[in-house]
Image (tube, rainbow, N blue to C red):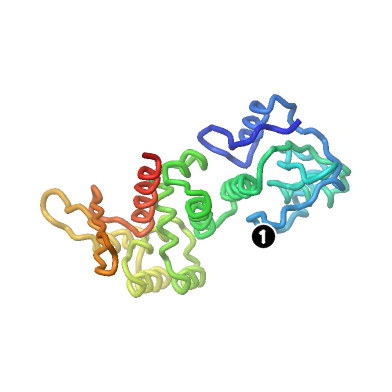
Amino acid sequence: MSMKRGLPERSSMRHDAHFVEELTRRSGRHIGSMIPLDLIEPNAEQPRTQLGNIEELAASIKEKGVLEPILVRNAGPNRYQIISGERRFRAASLAGLDEIPAIELDVDDKEQLEIALIENIQRKDLTAFEEAEGFLALQQKFGYTHEKISHVIGKSRTTITETLSINEIPDRIRAMCREAGISNKSILVQIARAGDEQAMEDVVRRFGAGELTRDDVRKQTAKAEPKKAGRPKNFTWQVKDKSLPFSVNLSFRKANVGKSEIAEALRELLRRIESE
C-alpha cells in the first residue's frame, strides 16, 4: 500500500535518516521494503543531471549495504520509478546487489519533481550558485515563499533571502567568479549587492587579485547604501506606465531591497488577493 499524498509537515526535508523516519512515521510502514533493481527505472525529469563518481559509494554499499532507502512511485504493474536516490540505485547495481530498500510514495508528476528538487538542494556538495538556482526553482515552479523554503529546507529565512540574491549575478560575472576561485557564499552575496554589473566586476577583479579581503568586500558593497542620519529611508518600488490602467507603489520597511525580494512581495500580494 502506498503512502498518502503530500510532503512531510516538518521543518526540514534532509537527505538523511531524519527525512526517511518522518516518511515512515506517516506511512506506518517499515523502513526499507526490498524491491528488485530490475523493477526500478530512473526518472528522466529528475533535477540532478550529474551523478558524479559513484564507485566510492558502491564500495561503501558492498561493505555496509544501502543505509538509506530510496524513494519510488508506482510506474505500472510491478514497475517503480525513482523519485530520489538515483546515486544509491546506480551504486547498488555497481556493487552487485539484486534489490534495494525503498519507500513507495503516492505522488503525481508535480509532487515527484518537488520532492526530488528539495532533496537535491539538501546535498552537501552543492555550490552556492546551484543552491541559489534550486531555491529559485522552488519559487518559480511551485510558488514557494522565502518563509516556506526556510521551513522545508531547514535554514533561516535570512539565509534563504541572501542565497536567492546570488541569482542576480549575471552569467559573465559568475564565470569570472569561478575563474578567480570565488565560491564562498557570503562573498557572492556581497558581490550581488555591489550594484550594477560593472561594480560587481570591479569587486571580483580586486578580490581575485588579493587587493580586497572579505571585510573589505563587505565595506565596499555597503558604500552603495546611502548613509543618512537618523532612521534610514524606506525603499520604494514603483510602476508607472501610461499604457497600463493602474500604477503600483510598494514601500518596504528597510532601505535596501533586491529584485528577488520585490518579486517575492508581489507573489505574496497576489496570493492574498486570490484567497480573499
**Could you tell me which residue is drawn at 54 percent across and 58 percent down?**
130
Mark 1, residue position: 49
| Residue 274, placed above or below residue 244 | above
Residue 225 relative to residue 263: left or right: left
**Could you tell me which residue is drawn at 65 percent across and 26 percent down?**
25
Picture coordinates of residue 265, whole percent (x, y): 34, 50
Picture coordinates of residue 153, whole percent (x, y): 52, 42
| Residue 73, placed above or below residue 169 | above
| Residue type pointed to by label 1 | Thr
Picture coordinates of residue 203, whole percent (x, y): 36, 69
Residue 38 relative to residue 124: left or right: right
| Residue 264, placed above or below residue 167 | above
**Could you tell me which residue is drawn at 37 percent across and 49 percent down?**
270
Q: Nearer the viewer, residue 255 or 236?
A: 236
Picture coordinates of residue 210, whole percent (x, y): 40, 69
Label 1 neighbour load within 10 Å: few <14, some 14-19, many 20+: few
In the displayed orientation, state which residue is furthest to the front.
245
State which quarter of the image contains the N terminus: top right
